[in-house]
């Protein structure tokens, strides 16, 4: 994991905000990039700013974080990472080419964690997850239309091998958005949310071969 570095004042190993959390997590929180969702100074996704200050207490309430807020939160059953993990000069947003170039690093983290529930935060992350991991991107306005993140917030969307729960950017939350997300996650955690399939029918013999 050696993404390119575009910040001259930083060294090679300090150019990105890498994924953080439980490597065996069932929940994967997916953000945009450090300049948007935090971590530029702390090196941890969703920290050091308003997004983390609003989101972390909800995750703490449902048992995924051990702190109401921390720059190095204790995590259980949750992994956090960004579509574009590299820091960029002046915190500017990535270009489409830069998103494309960094997608392989995000994909490597996502496949290594193999979570059951994807939690994309904000429109950019949600659009990527809908196109890559569901068959419903056009249904929800991600085909050049206008996606309604307020309506999508905390909804359960069945994806291709994943349950997707979009999260409206916390900087845009209304008074009830935190409670809605808290209620949704509590319900999922109390249910049989894990998705698995028996591929034993493709193998010799009668033994099951169950994968996530």
Image: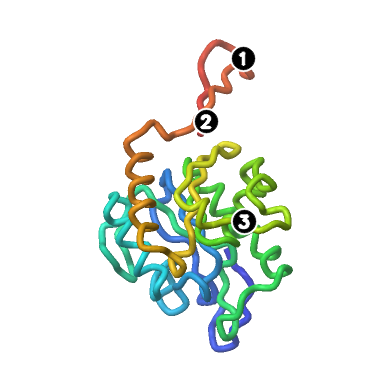
Name which of mark 3 and mark 1 comes first in the sequence: 3
Seen in the picture, residue 8 relative to 85 is either above or below; the reply is below
Say which of marks 3 and 1 sits in front. 3
For the point 55% across and 37% down, which residue is it? 158
Which residue position is annotated with label 2?
A: 211
Say which of marks 1 and 2 sits in front. 2
Please give left or right for residue 34 compared with residue 70 in the image.
right
The mark found on residue 158 in the picture is none
Residue in front for this viewpoint, 196 or 49:
49
Please give left or right for residue 164 compared with residue 177 in the image.
right
Helix, strand or loop status at disc 1: loop
Residue in front for this viewpoint, 76 or 90:
90
Q: Are marks 2 and 3 in contact (CB under 8 Å)?
A: no
Percent position (x, y) of residue 3? Answer: 61, 69
In this picture the colour scheme is: rainbow
Percent position (x, y) of residue 154? Answer: 45, 49
Which residue position is annotated with label 1?
A: 204
Quadrant in which the N terminus appears: bottom right
For the point 40% across and 75% down, which residue is it? 49
Which residue position is annotated with label 3?
A: 147
- Whole-angstrom CA distance, mark 3 to mark 1, is 46 Å
Name which of mark 2 and mark 3 comes first in the sequence: 3
Q: Are marks 3 and 1 in contact (CB under 8 Å)?
A: no
């Amino acid at each position: 994991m050696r993404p390119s570095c575009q910040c001259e004042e930083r060294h090679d190993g300090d150019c990105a905000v890498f994924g953080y959390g439980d490597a065996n997590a069932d929940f994967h929180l997916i953000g945009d990039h450090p300049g948007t969702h935090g971590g530029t100074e702390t090196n941890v996704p969703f920290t050091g700013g308003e997004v983390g200050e609003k989101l972390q207490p909800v995750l703490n309430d449902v048992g995924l974080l051990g702190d109401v807020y921390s720059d190095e939160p204790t995590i259980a059953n949750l992994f956090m990472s960004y579509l574009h993990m590299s820091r960029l000069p002046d915190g500017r947003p990535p270009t489409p080419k830069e998103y494309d170039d960094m997608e392989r690093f995000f994909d490597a983290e996502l496949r290594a964690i193999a979570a059951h529930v994807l939690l994309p935060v904000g429109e950019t992350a949600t659009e990527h997850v809908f196109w890559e991991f569901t068959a419903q991107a056009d249904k929800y306005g991600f085909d050049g239309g206008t996606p309604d993140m307020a309506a999508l917030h905390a909804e359960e969307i069945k994806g291709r091998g994943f349950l997707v729960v979009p999260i409206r950017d916390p900087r845009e939350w209304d008074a009830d958005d935190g409670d809605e997300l808290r209620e949704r996650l509590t319900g999922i955690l109390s249910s049989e949310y894990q998705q698995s399939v028996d591929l034993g029918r493709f193998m010799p013999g009668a033994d099951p071969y169950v994968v996530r």
